[in-house]
Image (cartoon, rainbow, N blue to C red):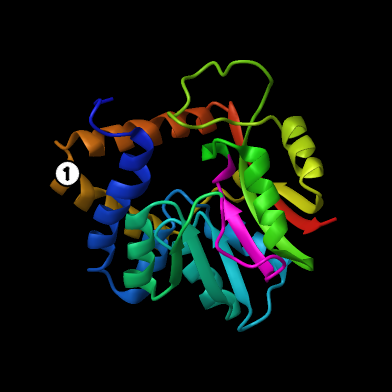
Amino acid sequence: MSDSFDAMDAEFDTVAAWTAEVVAGLALPDRIPAGCRGSGSPGALHWLLDHLQPQAQETFLDCGGGIGGPAAFAARETGVRPLLTDPERGACKAARSLFGLAALQAGSQLPIATGAIGAGWSLGVLCTVDDQPAYLAEIRRVLRPEARFGMIVYCAAHSGDLRLEPPEGNAFPTVEALERLLAEASLRVLSSGWTDHFAAFPANWEDVMATVQAELECHHRDDPRWKTAEEQSSKMGALLGAGEVRGKMLVLRPV
């Protein structure tokens, strides 16, 4: 990796901004599949929404929401009003411009009142957070007592070192470690599943994502930031493909 930039910034900020430029040229129905790249298949998102049961017009928190595809999906499917947070300025700007979402630039400290949120999710974010207990505690803080909150957490299949090299900036808890983290944060698991049970993407989603990927490669293939982001994505794909890491879907409630 180049010393002049950070791998996480390249993946989640710079490439997010480039992706937004490509997605802006797509028809509105195609923007959601394009904005969900790397965030979970529609089957997994539907599973979460079915268990979360958010109410139409309810504020729905997407914590670490990237460029906004999953939040826009939740709004389309259930009528919620998404509130997206993300630490990267480029991602927040993209979520606003592509989907008209309310987006706040924020990391683990959420600029949200205690007990203000009744429903929401955080998809694939926990493994990228430096202080995982603090992140979960902050989510717990903003939830109402009766709230339901969904997560996709990428978990290491076994304790000890991974056999394959992980993406920079990622730390994958085991399922047992995740259970301890959630208990310490006073979050109770209501339902759980695995993303690989919903791994297939519909053909129209695959086509849109392939179009976006081709456009990004055409314009940025020689940029070292693109190469770094692709290396990050490739490492994650290899871990998932080898079964070293699996995506755990959770529906949580404050204790």
**Vertical position of residue 73 compared to residue 79: above or below:** above
Residue toward you, 130 or 238:
130
Q: Position of residue 204 (x, y in %)?
A: 39, 63
* Element marked by disc 1: helix
- Queried whether the magenta region covers residue 82, the answer comes back as no
User: Residue drawn 37% across and 46% down?
Assistant: 12
Q: From the viewer's perspective, is 160 left or right of 124?
A: right
Q: Give neighbour class at mark 1: few <14, some 14-19, many 20+ (Cα, 10 Å).
A: some
Q: What amino acid type is highlighted by mark number 1?
A: His
Q: Which residue is mark 1?
A: 220
Residue range corresponding to the magenta coloring:
109-126
Please say whether residue 124 is one of the residues in the magenta stretch: yes
Task: Kindly identify the residue that appears in the image at 16 percent across and 37 percent down.
Answer: 223
Check the picture and name the quadrant holding the C terminus: bottom right
x and y percent of residue 101 in the render?
43, 73
- Residue at position x 48%, y 56% in the image: 106
Q: Is residue 138 above or below residue 116?
A: above
- Position of residue 35 measured from the top left corner of the image (x, y, whole percent): 39, 60
Residue 98 is situated, as x and y percent measured from the top left of the image, at: 33, 70
